[in-house]
């Protein structure tokens, strides 16, 4: 840094264009830009994208394709429908959460974010037909921060399972399943 005629000269990477307007007006452009960016970040419904056919969530897109995401209302409809083959449902999160509340008929398959949990998952599906329909879910926390769902999905696909769906719980199991009145079991 140096000085030139009373002005501080910054290296190019820190250089900012000087606004010729005096006083607070010089910052109004920056303030307007900040307001627009904040409004975009915190606009209702924009915090977590809903997965739909043809779209994927930002963090899951690289590892779980949108076609493999299942919305809670879709799974509830499948479970309510009479007849037809029901998928095997595996909870791949915390056992404490599973014991508190889980989808009826689901099985605890280990916290897939840990090596021991992945081993439990592998042991649980050993001997299953690779084309068996499977639904995995966690719901421990917001989808984009879940440490369990992506490792479980990758593990099952690596084992050759071809019909794996991940239940998309945007916030958590309580908000996206229990609070919506979908069926719940407790214990185990």
Image (cartoon, rainbow, N blue to C red):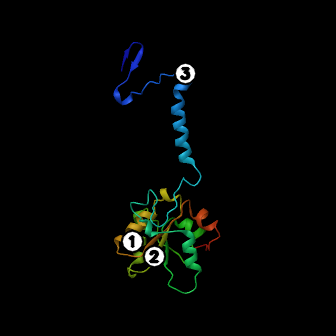
Q: Who comes first in sequence, dot 3 or dot 2?
A: 3
Q: Which residue does the numbered mark 1 point to in the structure image?
A: 156
State left or right for residue 2 relative to residue 138.
Answer: left
Residue 142 visible, this orientation: yes
- Mark toward the start of the polypeptide (2 vs 1): 2
Is the residue 74 above or below the residue 169 in the image? Answer: below
In the image, is residue 60 above or below residue 32?
Answer: below
Which SS class for mark 1? helix
Q: Quadrant of residue 184?
A: bottom right
Which quadrant holds the N terminus?
top left
Estimate the spatial distance between the alpha carbons at disc 3 and disc 2, rounded to whole Å.
63 Å
| Nearer to me, 131 or 186 | 131
Number of the label disc, if any, that sits on residue 23: 3
- Which residue sits at x=42%, y=80%? 132
Residue 46 spot, x, y in % from top left: 54, 53
Disc nearest the viewer among 3 and 1: 3
For label 1, count other residues whose C-alpha is less than 10 Å away and answer few (under 14), some (14-19) or many (20+): many
Query: Label 3: how many residues lie within 10 Å, few (<14), some (14-19) or many (20+)?
Result: few
Instruction: Pick the quarter of the image with the C terminus.
Output: bottom right
Most foreground residue, 185 or 73: 73
Give me the residue at 55% from left, 65% from top. Answer: 96
Mark drawn on residue 134: 2
- Depth check, mark 3 against mark 2: the one in front is 3
Visible residue check, residue 104: no
């Amino acid at each position: 840094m140096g000085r030139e005629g009373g002005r501080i000269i910054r290296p190019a990477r820190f250089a900012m264009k000087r606004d010729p307007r005096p006083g607070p007006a010089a910052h109004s452009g920056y303030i307007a830009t900040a307001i627009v960016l904040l409004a975009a970040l915190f606009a209702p419904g924009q915090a977590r994208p809903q997965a739909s056919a043809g779209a994927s969530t930002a963090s899951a897109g690289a590892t779980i394709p949108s076609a493999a995401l299942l919305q809670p209302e879709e799974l509830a409809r499948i479970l309510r429908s009479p007849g037809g083959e029901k998928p095997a449902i595996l909870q791949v999160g915390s056992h404490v959460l599973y014991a508190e509340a889980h989808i009826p008929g689901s099985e605890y398959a280990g916290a897939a974010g840990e090596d021991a949990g992945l081993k439990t998952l592998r042991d649980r599906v050993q001997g299953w037909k690779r084309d068996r329909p499977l639904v995995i879910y966690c719901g421990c926390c917001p989808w984009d921060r879940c440490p369990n769902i992506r490792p479980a999905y990758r593990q099952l696909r690596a084992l050759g399972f071809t019909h794996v769906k991940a239940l998309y719980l945007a916030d958590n199991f309580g908000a996206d399943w229990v609070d919506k009145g979908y069926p719940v079991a407790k214990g185990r």
